[in-house]
Image: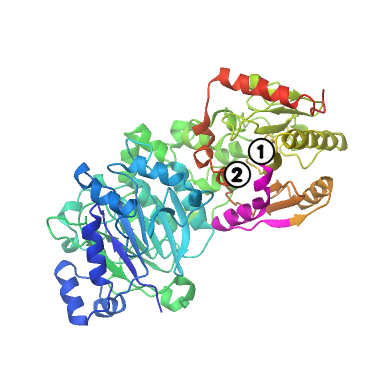
Amino acid sequence: MAPRILLCGDPLGRLNQLFKRVQSVSHTLPLYLLLILYLPRVLIESQFFTQVSKSAGPFDALICVGQFFPDSPELLDEFMNYVEGRAQVPIPTYFTGDYGVSAPKILSATSKKAENQGFKMDGLVVAHNLFWLRGSGKFTLHGLSVAYLSGRESSDGQFGKYSQDDVDTLRALADNSGVVDFLFTNEWPAGLTNRAAESDIPADVSDSSCCDFNVSELVKEVKPRYHIAGSMGVFYAREPYLNVDSSHVTRFLGLAQVGNKNKQKFLHALSPTPTSVMSPSELCAKPPNTTLCPYTLQEGAADSKKRSNDDASDSQYWRYDVSKRQKNGSDGEKLCFKFVCSGSCPRGESCHFQHNAEAREQCRRGVCLDLIIKGKCEKGPECSYKHEFQDLSVQRKPRSENANRSKECWFCLSSPSVESHLIVSVGESFYCALPKGSLVDDHILIIPIEHLPNTLALSPEGESELSRYQNGLRNCYKSQGNDAVFFELVSKRVSHANLQVVPVPSSRARLLPNIFSLAAEKLGFKLVTKKFSDSSEGRKYLQKEYDAALGLFYVELPDGTVLSHTLEENEVFPAQFGREVLAGLLKIPDRADWRNCKISQEEEAKLAEDFKKRFQEFDPCQ
């Protein structure tokens, strides 16, 4: 049987009213009563009678879009009854609108709960049956492929605002999987009413200035079967529309606020068959009222708006103005993100964006992608790419001849950008340093002195010194009751290698294989597990597995287990994956992002000096 899903617009903290309505429709009712319930508020699509009959309760889940938290303090007591367990949420309920009265306080506490550590794309537990869909993600709900973007484009606080990383993560997840059944966003996409029947368009949404251009671009990429949004305060069920380069149609549904004065529909029931069990003919069926994609008509308006707003121009991470960055194109030209990153684009000549060979070559020569795309880099010393455009008239040297220290590289010991106060040990081929924004106090980077892209293609002497540093750090951590975890991302986008080392309490080390594997599965890939009696054998295995044309992520665990994942061609791998997993294990999720861990240079220098003293007796270079 197809899952039965309830969809809701902005609850605005009115949970008593919402859940009373949910309970009233969560029981199987006679068809004529369902008609009375639904017809006054909406004209559904042509399969109305079938859809309502199929969508009678009980329901499997309720998903809320738009503002979930109260919009005034008067409703906070009612809201807190459900958060604190005095009132029961009657059905598994998921929400994306993480803003409103008391949202920062409640969601901060939610993030710190033990059950919410690690990767939780399927919702963080706020209370029994209540789940927060944080940031962006993709998961399976009763067989349905569900993707979401939480928050809004702009917000005054830490919560309620999506980041560009959230957008890019969702695009990468959707790009590497099958058809998405549901996409949930808080805001409506700009251009939605293009090509729609004028008589069906609510007057309140005729002005697209209150819609989100980022969501328009995202929905064009994800191509969901159903796109659900709130925040506009009105109900609108658009005719299905065709997707570019795809055979299935998308249906958009905008929902009103709970308890709105105009009696607009805020609750809608659907019982769609999951894509995974549909036949190709069923998936490709096109209703008679299907229109062309509405978003291809709004690109000009979006570009005009972005040119008048510098902040907005930075928000389109995969599209940017060539004339502003490199002055090699006319005003308004946009580059294709996929072509710049990989050198190819599946759309070929039908792609709407420019396949610029010069931008691609800048990327190949190690120029920071944020600098190319946005015109600036905000990652600081964590970024190991070049921060100046390269002279393309100079022939690119082979990698073997281009191993000199680059003055633009944050990690090169000879670079003026190197943070020398963080260095704790210097050897012949490697040096050790604390990272900026360390996960824990004794978090260490083992970094080649030579400008090398990874630690898997070393000379025998270099490998020997690396092994001595690893053993020294293992023994240092052991003296404090900890075990060492080593991980490295080997990728074309990493120009200077850094092997990260994080101490983990020995009592929790046994959890490492499972938590890494679980996190990988949540992101849609698998880690290969191999166990070795000697760490040198594990390194030899990794050297054999490494393919320079692809890339590799690997973890060396305390018991000799090696976890690895060979990157597929053009795969976008999360750069902070290792750190984020360990942040979950150590129950410090707020430190998963190094930018949350910044301290003054004086504090950094003191941490480095303290570690030097602890490491002195174990340092192989002393």
- For mark 1, what is the residue? 502
Q: Is residue 167 visible?
A: yes
Viewer-side residue, 296 vs 374: 374
Viewer-side residue, 403 vs 49: 49
Q: Is residue 559 left or right of residue 241?
A: right
Residue 166 % position (x, y): 45, 46
Q: Residue at x 20, y 56 (%)?
A: 234
CB atoms of marks 1 and 2 within 8 Å: yes
- Marks 1 and 2 sit apart, C-alpha to C-alpha, by 8 Å
Residue 554 % position (x, y): 69, 48
Q: Is residue 510 magenta?
A: yes
For residue 58, what is the image quadrant?
Answer: bottom left
Disc 1, SS: strand
Considering only order in the chain, which callout, 2 or 1, is on the residue closer to the N terminus? 1
Q: Dot 1, how many residues are within 10 Å of its Cα: few (below 14), some (14-19), or many (20+)? A: many
Q: Is residue 318 left or right of residue 500?
A: left
Viewer-side residue, 101 vs 401: 101
- For mark 2, what is the residue? 582
Q: Quadrant of the N terminus?
A: bottom left
Q: Residue at x 80, y 49 (%)?
A: 538
Q: Is residue 603 left or right of residue 94?
A: right
State the extent of the magenta-drawn residues as a range: 505-529
For residue 20, what is the image quadrant?
Answer: bottom left
Q: Is residue 582 magenta?
A: no
Query: Which numbered circle lies on residue 550?
Result: none
- Residue pushed farthest front? 86
Is the residue 21 above or below the residue 583 in the image?
below
Disc 2, SS: helix
